[in-house]
């Protein structure tokens, strides 16, 4: 679902800033002979913390995202020069770690940290050669939509100083978006353009940001409404000073934000005029190798496009057999496709497409989460302290946002984790999917995994904040199946909804590889999904557009879930009555995000240890 800038994707976007230059520290030969392992582990953890803090200092927006206020008047340097420098520093940092520390001289968690840091460096190196292939702007998570989302949701205003910092960021948008624009222009000059359809979506979202007061004579624009409300709520600032702050914000919007967006819109329209209708990245220079690198990154495996495609076909067939069992249970007569049509069209499965329906959806989704909270002791040993809430996607970005996603809590816990649901058209959020969706994005899904990782003790910060899509989204999809064993799905249709969510991710394996490797058209992918899954057509079309601009990412969910489910089954078979689901979940979650190969090692280690204790 994820991702989410300023969701899962935000962590990925900002993560590069968290690997920076090496710090000269004690080498292995300098460590005292006594407690050498403990000593060197402590030293490397201090080294990791120094690297993390150096990286964090380079990203004022990451600081704000994590609830820190030290550089809240600044935006990140997103120029190509800054990205090149960041990459060079990442590689130097990994080289320094290898020189200064020995894997053999670290304890268990120290070894995991070392290997993960090295893995991150190797991934960065592999991806750097295709840096020019990854679209600077896309309609899902481009900076044109992420910036207002960031300001509205993460830039808090508790004082006049905070308000001035907000205004300073508004004034910095011309330079900020100009850096992104320069990179996008360079891409276009090298032949890397989005498919033609995507540009209209970019223009629409950009126009939404600068529509309304103070830009036009309508209701307040999103950013103006946000800063106006935040200034009005300042309790220790007199009205005269509030008026000055609001006028300064208005001028920043008119003189910086508006020109920045107008420049972007002009670029989008110019690129649209020369863009083509081919959708897959096979059309880009060295496109096949680029797509394979995307699959490697997303799945943390070496699976090829053909292998992933075939896994998808097999999983779709298997899940459809499970679906037919539920059709028999509810005594539905007709084909699976007939049942899909019934689910898409019968009014019993949708709420009213108005504010009352939106409020009802939010209320019922919150109940699903609250009821799941009561079952956590049966499933988990470690539970997060951070709270989680259900929120509606802001109207200004509904047209381009995913249908649901999760955003992590602040580091200090003052901002809860949030499950965002897109209610632009309530009919695209059928009620039979509500439970599975809430379990995936909230509890026991992303909130459990991400908040637990953030609160882990005794491991470096980069592991708490890092993310591997196959692990994170694999856990989210796996979490949809966990409530089955507790009887949480309240009727056969909701359980069918769980299978619908799973087949949705299985079909992604087919269409993502179809589009980017097998040269499927946009419409060919849509028709495959319409035939094989139950999701509404509007949702399917939006999803296909997402896969087109974000190649490979959507394959991570099912590949990750399959690995976690495989490991669970292995543990159950080898441990028998000694298998404890709470312990298994602790093993999966207690080390933060890891590649699937490392997760398998950790689970196998736990199984072997349990066997020796029998």
Image (spheres, helix red, strand yellow):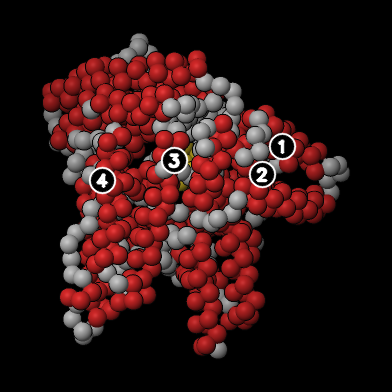
> Is the residue under label 2 in contact with that under label 1 (CB below 8 Å)?
yes
Tell me the crowding category of disc 3: few under 14, some 14 to 19, or many 20 or more residues within 10 angstroms, Cα based: some
Q: Which badge, 1 or 3, is on the more N-terminal residue? A: 3
- The Cα atoms of the two marked residues, 4 and 2, are separated by 38 Å
Tell me the crowding category of disc 4: few under 14, some 14 to 19, or many 20 or more residues within 10 angstroms, Cα based: many
- The Cα atoms of the two marked residues, 1 and 2, are separated by 9 Å
Looking at the image, is mark 4 or mark 2 nearer the viewer?
Answer: 2
- The Cα atoms of the two marked residues, 2 and 3, are separated by 24 Å
Quadrant housing the C terminus: bottom right
Looking at the image, is mark 1 or mark 4 nearer the viewer?
Answer: 1
- Residue under the image location 59 percent in, 23 percent down: 277
Write down the residue under mark 3.
130
- The Cα atoms of the two marked residues, 1 and 4, are separated by 43 Å
Q: Which badge, 4 or 2, is on the more N-terminal residue? A: 4
For label 4, the SS is: helix
- 527 relative to 18, above or below: above
- Residue under the image location 26 percent in, 49 percent down: 89
Write down the residue under mark 4.
63
Write down the residue under mark 2.
510
Within the image, what quadrant is residue 234 found in?
top left
- The Cα atoms of the two marked residues, 1 and 3, are separated by 30 Å
The residue closer to the viewer here, 400 or 404, is 400
Q: Which badge, 1 or 4, is on the more N-terminal residue? A: 4
For label 2, the SS is: helix
Q: Which badge, 4 or 3, is on the more N-terminal residue? A: 4
């Amino acid at each position: 679902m994820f991702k989410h800038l300023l969701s899962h994707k935000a962590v990925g976007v900002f993560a590069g800033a968290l690997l920076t230059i090496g710090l000269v520290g004690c080498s292995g030969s300098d460590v005292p002979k006594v407690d050498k392992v403990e000593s060197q582990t402590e030293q490397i953890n201090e080294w990791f913390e120094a690297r993390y803090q150096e990286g964090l200092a380079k990203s004022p927006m990451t600081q704000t995202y994590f609830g820190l206020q030290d550089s809240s008047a600044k935006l990140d340097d997103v120029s190509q020069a800054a990205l090149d420098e960041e990459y060079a520093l990442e590689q130097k940092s990994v080289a320094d770690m290898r020189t200064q520390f020995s894997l053999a001289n670290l304890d268990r968690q120290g070894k995991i940290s070392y290997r993960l840091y090295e893995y991150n460096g190797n991934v960065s190196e592999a991806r750097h050669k295709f840096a020019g292939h990854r679209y600077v702007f896309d309609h899902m998570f481009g900076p044109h939509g992420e910036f207002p989302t960031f300001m509205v949701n993460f830039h808090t205003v508790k004082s006049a100083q905070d308000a001035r910092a907000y205004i300073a960021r508004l004034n910095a948008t011309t330079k900020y978006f100009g850096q992104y624009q320069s990179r996008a222009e360079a891409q276009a000059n090298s032949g890397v353009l989005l498919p033609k359809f995507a540009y209209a979506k970019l223009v629409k979202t950009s126009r939404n940001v600068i529509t309304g007061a103070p830009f036009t004579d309508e209701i307040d624009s999103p950013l103006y409404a946000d800063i106006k409300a935040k200034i009005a709520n300042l309790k220790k600032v007199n009205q005269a000073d509030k008026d000055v702050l609001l006028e300064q914000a208005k001028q920043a919007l008119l003189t910086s934000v508006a020109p920045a967006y107008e420049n972007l819109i002009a670029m989008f329209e110019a690129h649209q005029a020369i863009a083509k209708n081919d959708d897959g990245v096979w059309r880009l220079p060295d496109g096949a190798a680029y797509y394979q690198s995307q699959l490697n990154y997303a799945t943390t495996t070496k699976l090829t496009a053909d292998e992933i495609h075939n896994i998808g076909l097999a999983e779709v067939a298997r899940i459809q057999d499970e679906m037919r069992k539920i059709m028999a249970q509810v005594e539905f007569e007709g084909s699976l496709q007939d049942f899909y049509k019934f689910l898409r069209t019968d009014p019993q499965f949708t709420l009213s497409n108005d504010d009352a329906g939106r409020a009802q959806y939010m209320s019922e989704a919150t109940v699903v989460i609250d009821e799941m909270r009561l079952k956590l002791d049966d499933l988990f040993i470690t539970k997060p302290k951070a709270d989680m809430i259900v929120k509606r996607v802001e109207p200004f970005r509904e047209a381009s946002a995913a249908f649901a996603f999760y955003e992590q809590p602040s580091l200090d816990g003052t901002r809860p984790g949030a499950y965002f649901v897109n209610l632009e058209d309530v009919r695209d959020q059928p009620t039979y999917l509500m439970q599975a969706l809430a379990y995936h994005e909230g509890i026991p899904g992303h909130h459990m995994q991400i908040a637990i990782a953030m609160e882990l003790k005794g491991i470096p910060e980069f592991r708490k904040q890092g993310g591997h899509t196959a692990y994170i989204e694999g856990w989210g999809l796996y979490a949809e199946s966990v409530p089955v064993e507790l009887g949480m799905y309240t009727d056969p249709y909701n359980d069918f909804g769980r299978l619908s969510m799973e087949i949705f991710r299985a079909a992604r394996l087919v269409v993502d590889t179809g589009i980017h490797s097998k040269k499927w058209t946009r419409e060919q992918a849509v028709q495959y999904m319409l035939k094989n899954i139950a999701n509404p057509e509007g949702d399917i079309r939006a999803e296909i557009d997402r896969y087109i601009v974000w190649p490979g990412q959507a394959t991570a969910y099912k590949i990750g879930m399959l690995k976690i489910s495989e490991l669970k089954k292995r543990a159950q078979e080898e441990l028998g009555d000694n298998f404890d689901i709470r312990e298994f979940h602790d093993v999966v979650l207690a080390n933060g995000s890891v590649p699937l190969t490392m997760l398998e090692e950790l689970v196998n280690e736990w199984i072997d240890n349990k066997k020796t204790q029998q």
